[in-house]
């Protein structure tokens, strides 16, 4: 919640009006174990927003942050609200291990620790395997080779590095100050270091992460990260009445679901639904963000949607930037805006798959 509070503070600051105008908050968060009651409430209170502001936690696994934005938009279009705070947050480094048998007591024999990240964030409970195995199934079904996935991952890192070096993320990312509790020393973190970690000559030599003869590796999959994203969403009337200059307009959105093992291709179902709701066609969309849960995800969805990969994840994606699961759905909306602005483009679509077979998409 504290990293969420940092993103919220900056979003409210950029809003530029009295924070009392904000009527409600929807915040995505997936693994809430160990961080205390009502994480969204904590993030809002820590950010300094009024104690009267109601909040709701949203858990749609990796699509949580995007669903928070969609729910906010629906609150406005229904006439119920005019100004909302939306976003997502996840601190994967703080997700605890569980002792499932401790409540009733251990007896003779070994006990076990359960990794909360895997158990509640990355495990396909219906097929009893890691979501990486779903990536493997997708690669096999659609004949996506190891080389294609490795090449895609290398390109994601290249694009992320270029975007950082040319200042594309400067307005999208804020600096976090961390205090060493022992020494009091302050460390400023202004960018995640992952995009600098790749060793290109090692990518093709890595062992498969999920299947003995598989194609998904630590290099061509997304990384475990801490992160948060936040934005203020208003009605058009409120923006006009208060002479605000919106960054973008939400044109429409869509959700879809299919078999849990096929979650990797669910964006190809959600995106057309978002097109329809937005009243646009595929040819109208100039740029796409497709969350890189694994490199195979944008590769296969671009194929199914007939997209040009040069127009997908232009500034890199989760393979290079990381995937804090409750945050990413909101982050890629902001990333899409940054791309549209940089390219002087008008329409874009962001989409993200989520565990259990689902996906969400939004057109801005």
Image (cartoon, rainbow, N blue to C red):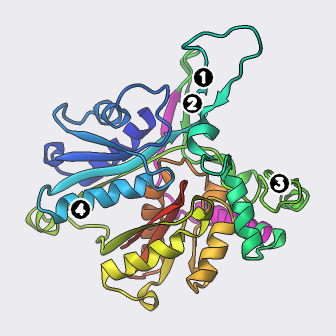
For disc 1, the marked residue is 100
Q: Residue at x 72, y 55 (%)?
A: 133
Query: As drawn, which residue projects farthest toward the left?
Result: 241
Local packing at callout 4 (Cα closer than 10 Å; few below 14, some 14-19, many 20+) is few
For disc 2, the marked residue is 94
Q: Earlier in the sequence, mark 1 or mark 4?
A: 4
For disc 4, the marked residue is 74
**In front of the other: label 1 or label 4?**
1
**Proximity of marks 2 and 3: CB atoms separated by less than 8 Å:** no
Residue 200 x/y as whole percent = 83, 61
Local packing at callout 3 (Cα closer than 10 Å; few below 14, some 14-19, many 20+) is few
Residue sitting nearer the eye, 242 or 210:
210
Secondary structure at numbered mark 1: loop
**In front of the other: label 1 or label 2?**
1
The answer to whether residue 344 is visible is yes
* In the depicted structure, whether residue 69 falls above or below residue 58: below
Measure how far apart labels 3 and 1 are at the Cα level: 27 Å
Q: Earlier in the sequence, mark 4 or mark 3?
A: 4
Image quadrant where residue 317 sits: bottom right
In the image, 42: left or right of 358? left
**Proximity of marks 4 and 3: CB atoms separated by less than 8 Å:** no
Residue 118 x/y as whole percent = 64, 40
Residue 205 x/y as whole percent = 91, 58
Q: Which residues are magenta?
A: 150-178
């Amino acid at each position: 919640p504290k990293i969420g509070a940092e993103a919220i503070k900056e979003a409210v600051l950029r809003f530029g009006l009295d924070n009392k105008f904000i009527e409600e908050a929807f915040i995505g968060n997936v693994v809430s174990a160990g961080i205390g009651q009502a994480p969204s409430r904590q993030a809002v209170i820590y950010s300094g927003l009024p104690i009267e502001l109601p909040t709701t936690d949203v858990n749609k696994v990796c699509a949580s942050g995007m669903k928070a934005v969609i729910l906010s938009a629906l609150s406005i279009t229904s006439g119920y609200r005019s100004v909302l705070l939306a976003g997502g947050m996840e601190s994967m480094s703080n997700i605890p291990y569980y002792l499932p048998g401790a409540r009733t007591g251990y007896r003779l024999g070994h006990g076990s620790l359960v990794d909360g990240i895997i158990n509640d964030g990355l495990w396909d409970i219906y097929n009893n395997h890691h979501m990486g195995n779903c990536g493997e199934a997708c690669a096999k079904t659609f004949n996506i080779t190891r080389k294609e996935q490795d090449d895609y991952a290398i390109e994601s890192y290249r694009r992320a590095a270029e975007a950082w070096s040319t200042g594309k993320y400067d307005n999208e990312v804020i600096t976090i100050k961390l205090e060493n509790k022992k020494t009091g020393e302050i460390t400023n973190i202004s960018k995640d270091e992952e995009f600098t970690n790749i060793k290109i000559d090692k990518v093709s030599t890595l062992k498969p992460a999920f299947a003995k003869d598989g194609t998904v590796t630590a290099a061509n999959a997304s990384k475990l990260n801490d992160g948060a994203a936040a934005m203020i969403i208003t009605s058009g009337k409120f923006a006009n009445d208060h002479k605000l200059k919106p960054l973008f307009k939400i044109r429409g959105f869509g959700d879809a679901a299919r078999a849990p093992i096929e979650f990797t291709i669910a964006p190809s179902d959600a995106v057309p639904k978002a097109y329809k709701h937005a009243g646009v066609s595929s040819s109208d969309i100039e740029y796409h963000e497709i969350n890189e849960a694994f490199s195979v995800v944008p590769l296969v969805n671009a194929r199914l949607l007939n997209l040009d990969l040069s127009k997908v994840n232009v500034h890199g994606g989760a393979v290079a930037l990381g995937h804090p699961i409750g945050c990413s759905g909101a982050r890629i909306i902001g990333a899409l805006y940054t791309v549209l602005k940089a390219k002087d483009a008008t329409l874009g679509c962001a989409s993200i798959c989520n565990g259990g077979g689902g996906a969400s998409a939004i057109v801005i």
